Image (tube, rainbow, N blue to C red):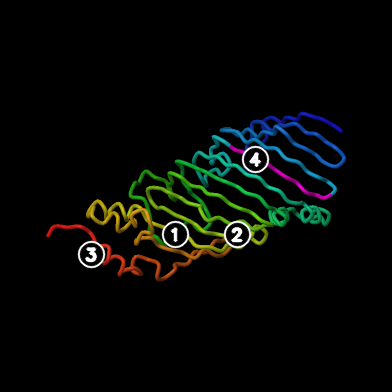
């Protein structure tokens, strides 16, 4: 059995920069264990622990990031403050087979045996570059009236929980809330093929705000009073992680619910 403490200072790669990488390693014939692992980016910290069993090529990882800045990892793509927590387990058999064939190891090789759970919470930021973002903005015609804001979508909160089973991730509560749009997603993604399948619900908040300012009486009708709002727009999510595809779902738009609008108006108290 071998016990060792390791530490690397000022790690740099093309994508990220870490001030410190360190942890305790215990090496045994049947298992390699990492405890008190830590990754220190320019902002915040990431704690890591886990183990790897060489004979079965299986692993378990626990990871917890706090007080992070998204732009430290996705420069010029996203901004915001964030935290995440996850537990993953799986095997590296497919990745090792690719390595033996002198092939490049990609996410699909690692993801094929991956299971676990990841929760993500980001606040006070923006998405500047993201596959499918321009298509969504074009479909919604949602651009900020504040000329000082950068291109993209700003958010107050962004996050959700992803459950992963044998390379397939699903979420039923991934949401973005902001001054431009509120967005909710029910989605499944095959992490091996990258294929996406799901539905995106969007409420353009700038449109709602402008209508409510003009006619305050319509606020509960347009927002659904905390339930499903009549001004929500639905999109079918397809394509791949690299090239998402959004298709407008007919019948689930403002013009698809005239009856409910009339019923709500008829029940609205007014002067006789």
At x 57%, y 36%, the residue is 66
Label 4: state its secondary structure.
strand
Give the Cα distance between marks 1 and 4.
30 Å
Provide the secondary structure element on which disc 3 rests: helix
Judging by the rendered image, the residue that carries numbered circle 4 is: 63
Distance in Å between CA atoms under marks 3 and 2? 43 Å
| CA distance separating discs 3 and 1 | 27 Å
| Mark 1–mark 4 CB contact (< 8 Å) | no
Residue 105's x, y, as percent? 74, 53
Query: Which label is found at residue 201?
Result: 1
Q: Earlier in the sequence, mark 3 or mark 2?
A: 2
State the residue at coordinates (61%, 63%).
195
Q: Quadrant of the N terminus?
A: top right
Where is residue 24 shown, x and y percent of the image?
A: 75, 31
Name the residue nearer the viewer: 264 or 80. Answer: 264
Of residue 86 and residue 191, the one placed in the foreground of this image is 86
| Residue of label 3 | 266
Question: In terms of sequence position, does the residue under pointer 4 or pointer 2 come before the other?
Answer: 4
What secondary structure is the magenta-colored segment mainly? strand
**Percent x, y of residue 211:** 27, 55
Q: Which residues are magenta?
A: 56-65
Q: Residue at x 63, y 32 (%)?
A: 40
Q: Nearer the viewer, mark 3 or mark 2?
A: 3
Q: Is residue 42 above or below residue 143?
A: above
Gap in Å between the C-alphas at discs 4 and 2?
21 Å
Look at the numbered disc 1 and give the secondary structure of its residue: strand
- The disc, 3 or 4, on the residue closer to the chain's N-terminal end is 4
CA gap, disc 3 and disc 4: 53 Å
Mark 4: few, some, or many residues within 10 Å (few <14, many ≥20)?
some
User: How many marks do you count on the picture?
Assistant: 4
């Amino acid at each position: 059995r071998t016990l060792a403490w390791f530490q690397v200072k000022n790690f740099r790669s093309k994508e990220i920069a870490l001030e410190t990488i360190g942890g305790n390693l215990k090496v045994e014939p049947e298992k390699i264990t990492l405890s008190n692992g830590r990754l220190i980016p320019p902002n915040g910290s990431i704690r890591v622990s886990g183990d790897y069993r060489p004979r079965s090529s299986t692993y378990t990882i626990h990871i917890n990031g706090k007080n992070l800045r998204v732009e430290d990892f996705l420069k010029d793509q996203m901004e915001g403050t964030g935290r995440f927590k996850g537990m993953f387990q799986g095997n590296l058999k497919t990745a090792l087979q690719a390595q033996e064939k002198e092939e490049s190891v990609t996410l699909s090789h690692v993801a094929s045996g991956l299971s676990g759970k990841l929760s993500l919470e980001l606040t006070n930021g923006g998405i500047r570059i993201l596959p499918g973002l321009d298509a969504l903005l074009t479909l919604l015609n949602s651009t900020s009236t504040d000329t000082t804001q950068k291109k993209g979508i700003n958010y107050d909160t962004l996050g959700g929980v992803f459950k992963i089973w044998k390379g397939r991730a699903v979420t039923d509560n991934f949401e973005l809330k902001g001054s431009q749009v509120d967005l909710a997603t029910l989605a499944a993604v095959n992490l091996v093929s990258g294929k996406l399948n799901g539905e995106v619900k969007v409420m353009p908040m700038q449109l709602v705000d402008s209508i409510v300012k003009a006619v305050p009486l319509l606020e509960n009708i347009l927002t659904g009073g905390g339930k499903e709002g009549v001004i929500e727009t639905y999109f079918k999510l397809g394509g791949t992680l690299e090239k998402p595809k959004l298709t407008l779902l007919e019948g689930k738009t403002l013009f698809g619910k005239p009856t409910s609008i009339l019923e709500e108006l008829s029940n609205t108290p007014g002067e006789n």
